[in-house]
Image: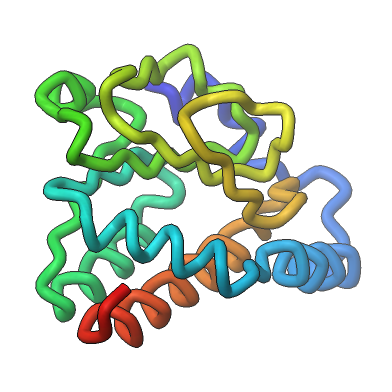
Amino acid sequence: MLLLSQPQLVYHHQGFNCQDYQALCIDNLSHAALDEKTLKQLALSVFQAERVVFVTFPTHYVLTLDFQCKMLLENKYIEILSLNNGFQILDSLGPRDLILYLTFSGKEASYFKPNQKVPTILITQNPCAKIGTQQIICGTSNQYGEGKYALLYFLDCLYQTYHRLKDVSF
């Protein structure tokens, strides 16, 4: 229902210009570059969590599924919930678990009420969004859906950091 109630956020195409789109993609990638300390800290949080739940908007579901598959290769299962359903699972989480909450705009916050006992990391493009215990900026624009490239880059960097560090003492 969320996808249908906000179609302008998903299917926006008025005024589309390919050169602008490419520039926005490149700009997003430059803003999604994380410093090594932040990536190591996040990889450590994922490593130490008993359960990791990724909550995402349906349009980013396939990217998070790719991340889930890569993490399975590392023997780390990442649960994925859509913003459309499954929030009862969050009530079963505790302080030794981790929620990764993805919302580029931050407008979906009314649908997500994090469990205060659970560390929650917000992945967003909106520096004003205030959800969770930590915030990671992943690009600056998703006007035409170009934010997916920054998210893909971010998730790949997180996976690579996790892979390099999992067999080494964090």
Residue 170 in picture, x, y percent from top left? 32, 73
Residue 7: which quarter of the image?
top right
Which colour scheme appears in the figure? rainbow
Kindly identify the residue that appears in the image at 71 percent across and 70 percent down: 29
Is residue 21 or residue 152 the one in the foreground? 152
Kindly identify the residue that appears in the image at 82 percent across and 66 percent down: 27
Kindly identify the residue that appears in the image at 49 percent across and 76 percent down: 157
Is residue 26 or residue 50 the one in the foreground? 50
Residue 14 in picture, x, y percent from top left? 81, 43
On screen, residue 37 versus residue 161, left or right, reads right
Kindly identify the residue that appears in the image at 24 percent across and 62 percent down: 47
Residue 31 in picture, x, y percent from top left? 75, 63
| Quadrant of the rendering where the N terminus is positioned | top left
Rendered position, 86 above or below 40: above
Q: What number of labels is visible?
A: 0
Rendered position, 96 above or below 88: below
On screen, residue 9 versus residue 22, left or right, reads left
Residue 58 in picture, x, y percent from top left? 39, 42
